[in-house]
Image (tube, rainbow, N blue to C red):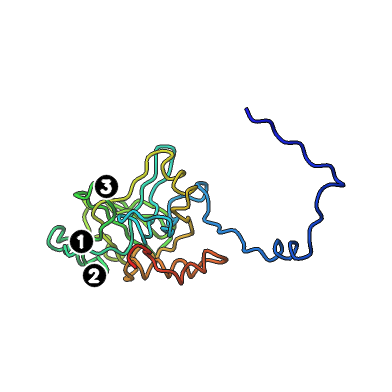
Amino acid sequence: MNPVPSSPEPERRPAASPAAGRRRRNAAPRLSVGTLDDVRPGALLVAMPALTDPTFAGSVVYVLDHSTTGTIGVVLGRPSEVRIGDVLPGWSDLAVEPAVFHVGGPCETDTALCLATRPGTGPLPEDSGLRPVCGAVHLVDLDSDPAPLAGEISGLRVFAGYAGWSPGQLAMEIVQGSWACVDGLPADVLTGADGPELWHAVLRRQTGRLGVLSTAPADPSAN
């Protein structure tokens, strides 16, 4: 074990110069990316430049569930070429444009997951197939009848697959600076913006150094 060096005697401690004091006062504020305590349903995980994994670089993930068993979300702004009407014809009329499956993440890509926004605040009708996530955002049971939702929701989006983290994994990635956790908006779920556009838009809503990052490339590895 290395011994801890003793502090120098006060009279031997060098005096701080005025210039050094100015540097401390004018130092750039620390980049605040949030903590694991900020991760909750409805929050957004925004990929930071340190994240170079091509699966998630430049991405924005909407958090659906977070607990001691792990975290689940969907990547926003990644439309595929598969039309909803070709697979789930009963739901295509309720989907926002483009009415295609969006790539929600690398986990269980053969699984369809649906999110909708509901402007009303009253009780959900029976057998609506809606389960609240956060505020106006709801999960939709695609095995239910879509007809009753025609007057209940303002639109929906269907995702193929999802993003998932095992216990402790996301905490480590946040500490490493891979993700920033910020507040999400219901409009983020149904936005027509592609991934890079949404990445910049979300960061422009932030303050401090995190907001300054909105001028950087969404995916630095693409340069």
Residue at (39, 41) in percent of width and height: 70
Front residue (pair 88, 105): 105
Front residue (pair 29, 159): 29
Residue at (70, 34) in percent of width and height: 4
* Image coords of residue 204 (percent x, y): 48, 70
* Image coords of residue 23 (percent x, y): 70, 64
Neighbor class of circle 3 (other Cα within 10 Å; few <14, some 14-19, many 20+) is some
Determine which of the numbered discs, if any, sits on residue 6 in the image: none
Neighbor class of circle 2 (other Cα within 10 Å; few <14, some 14-19, many 20+) is some
Determine which of the numbered discs, if any, sits on residue 91 in the image: 1
Q: Nearer the viewer, mark 1 or mark 2?
A: 2
Residue marked by disc 3:
107
- Separation of residues labelled 1 and 3 (CA atoms): 23 Å
Asked if marks 3 and 2 touch (Cβ < 8 Å), the reply is no
Name the amino acid type tagged 2. Pro
- Separation of residues labelled 3 and 2 (CA atoms): 23 Å
- Separation of residues labelled 1 and 2 (CA atoms): 13 Å
Mark with earlier residue (1, 2): 1
Name the amino acid type tagged 1. Trp
Secondary structure under the numbered disc 3 in the rendered image: strand
* Image coords of residue 176 (percent x, y): 47, 48
In screen coordinates, is 74 left or right of 184? left
The quadrant of the rendering that contains the N terminus is top right
Secondary structure under the numbered disc 2 in the rendered image: loop
Secondary structure under the numbered disc 1 in the rendered image: loop
Q: Nearer the viewer, mark 1 or mark 3?
A: 3
Q: How many marks?
A: 3
Mark with earlier residue (1, 3): 1
Residue at (46, 69) in percent of width and height: 214
Residue marked by disc 2:
98
* Image coords of residue 112 (percent x, y): 22, 52
Front residue (pair 115, 195): 195
